Amino acid sequence: MATEKKTDVGGVSAILGATTEARNAVGVAVSAALAGSSLTNVFARPSAVRSAPEVIESIHSQALAVREAAHQLTNRIEQFEACLASLEGRVDTTHFGVHPDSGPQNKLELAIRLHRKEKAWVLSWGSPIPRRNPFAEQLMDWLPLKEAPLKIKIAAIKIFPNFLETIEKTQIQLVEQIEKATAAFDAFAQTLPATGKERA
């Protein structure tokens, strides 16, 4: 009777068991990044017509709130990056989501990647470069996610829960590929001449 194969590399399945909570946490993180700021009032309709100096003064006063909210969002990305870097059995993984500049007439994808850079595991982002030849290898410039434009960070943090699931799927696929390669070698090994130890 066939037995069910369970793959749980680095405790990722345990993390994914709380995927719903993770999705909620993303919303909380974005809200927390903006909490306490007056950004929600930036586009509020003024009760009376204001002079240009008054509007400029308001813009200046909002600058600090914008910087603080952006800083908090970057902190969340760094926290997620550190969490992924600490996972055992982590693998190079790429996930595709919707690019913030994507529209009905211009479909764009936002790619998030966990990969090794020198001795550290980092999160990067990129957008597929259009190809003249549809059969050519897809090109991508990978840039640090924590240094990305604000709109990229906002779009990326929304797809973190799906990205986490993609890491798990990539691990499972890697295990299957390794097992197939091992089985292929074992079959090939049967055709090789016996070694000295085997003759003895």
Image (cartoon, rainbow, N blue to C red):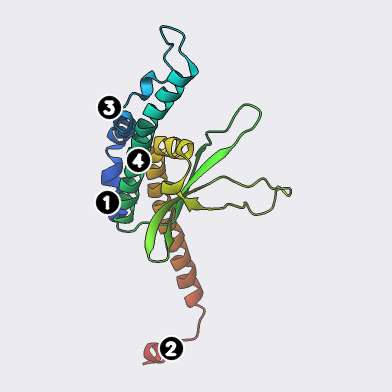
Asked whether the beta carbons under mark 4 and mark 1 sit within 8 Å of each other, the answer is no
Q: Secondary structure at mark 3?
A: loop
Query: Quick one: label 1 or label 3, which is nearer the N terminus?
Result: 1
How far apart are the alpha carbons under marks 4 and 2?
A: 62 Å
- Which residue is painted at 29% across and 28% down in the image? 35
| Left or right for 132, reference 178 | right
Residue annotated with mark 3: 36
Asked whether the beta carbons under mark 3 and mark 4 sit within 8 Å of each other, the answer is no
Q: Classify 10 Å Cα crowding around label 3: few (below 14), some (14-19), many (20 and above).
A: few
Residue furthest right as drawn = 132
How far apart are the alpha carbons under marks 2 and 1?
A: 40 Å
Q: Pinpoint residue 164: horizontal percent, then vertical percent.
A: 37, 44
Q: Is residue 27 above or below residue 141?
A: above
Asked whether the beta carbons under mark 2 and mark 1 sit within 8 Å of each other, the answer is no
Residue depth check, mark 4 versus mark 2: number of the one nearer the observer: 4
Check residue 71 in the rendering and tell me which mark sits there, or answer none: 4
Q: Pinpoint residue 11: horizontal percent, then vertical percent.
A: 27, 51
Residue annotated with mark 1: 11
| Left or right for 187, reference 198 | right
How far apart are the alpha carbons under marks 2 and 3?
A: 72 Å
- Looking at the rendered structure, the kind of residue marked 3 is Gly
